[in-house]
């Protein structure tokens, strides 16, 4: 008859082998996950870049969310029609039924589009840091705070909701760019 200690050692050895196998499998899954996340981030950045290239240019704001210097009065006649058309969009109107997202500047439309996509896919709200990564921006405080400022402005004007602090989603009845309202 085997000893109790011998039986315990056998079971311990079996359990250790199982733990080692599971760790190897977990390492393999972690490596696959890292590759998949990298691919996903590349596609998000690519989609963001295509949106920037194909979208209209807003001359009053740069992609960091800061206002660019406007031309002096003498230079106003030289301003392009695109920059003249973009000036009214630099303000965020209060949302109302029937108001289309095209009244907003491209930066605000990008925020709405990202949240509309999340809503359509039944995913939860986004933080500003997640938005920065989604838009291909460095998630540094300056960029994140610029997005937070825009998101808060959209909340204040009824376009977005902030049901949890720092987590933004579309407000009720807002569908985002291209989806009507």
Image: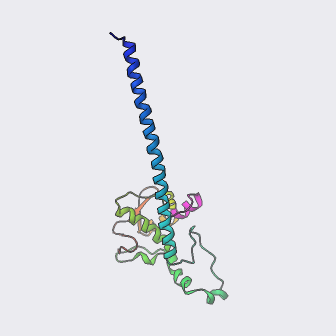
Q: Which residues are magenta?
A: 135-148
**In this view of the protein, which residue sits in the foreground, 45 or 18?**
18
Is residue 7 in the magenta section? no
In the displayed structure, would residue 109 be above or below residue 24? below
* Image quadrant occupied by the C terminus: bottom left
**In this view of the protein, which residue sits in the foreground, 178 or 24?**
24
Q: Residue furthest top?
A: 1
- Residue in view at x 35 percent, y 61 percent: 121
In percent of width and height, residue 157 lies at 44, 70
Indicate the colouring scheme.
Answer: rainbow
- Residue in view at x 45 percent, y 49 percent: 33
- Residue in view at x 62 percent, y 79 percent: 70
Q: Residue furthest bottom?
A: 77
Q: In which image quadrant can residue 112 be found? A: bottom left
In percent of width and height, residue 180 lies at 35, 75
In percent of width and height, residue 85 lies at 52, 84
In percent of width and height, residue 26 lies at 44, 40
**In this view of the protein, which residue sits in the foreground, 82 or 174?**
82
- Residue in view at x 39 percent, y 65 percent: 117
Residue 127 appears in the picture as rendered: no
- Left/right of residue 21 with respect to residue 68 in the rendered view: left
* Image quadrant occupied by the N terminus: top left
Residue 76 appears in the picture as rendered: yes
Q: Residue furthest front?
A: 1
């Amino acid at each position: 008859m085997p000893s109790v200690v011998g039986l315990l050692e056998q079971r311990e050895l079996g359990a250790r082998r199982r733990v080692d196998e599971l760790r190897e499998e977990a390492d393999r899954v972690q490596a696959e996950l890292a590759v998949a996340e990298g691919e996903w981030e590349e596609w998000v950045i690519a989609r963001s870049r295509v949106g920037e290239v194909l979208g209209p240019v807003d001359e009053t704001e740069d992609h960091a969310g800061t206002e660019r210097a406007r031309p002096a009065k003498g230079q106003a006649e030289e301003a392009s029609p695109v920059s003249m058309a973009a000036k009214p969009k630099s303000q965020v109107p209060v949302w109302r039924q029937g108001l289309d997202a095209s009244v907003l500047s491209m930066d605000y439309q990008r925020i709405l589009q990202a949240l509309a996509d999340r809503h359509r896919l039944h995913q939860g709200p986004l933080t500003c840091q997640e938005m920065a990564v989604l838009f291909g921006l460095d998630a540094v405080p300056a960029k994140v705070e610029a997005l937070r400022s825009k998101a808060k402005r959209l909340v204040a004007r009824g376009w977005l909701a902030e049901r949890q602090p720092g987590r933004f989603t579309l407000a009720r009845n807002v569908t985002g760019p291209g989806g009507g309202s």
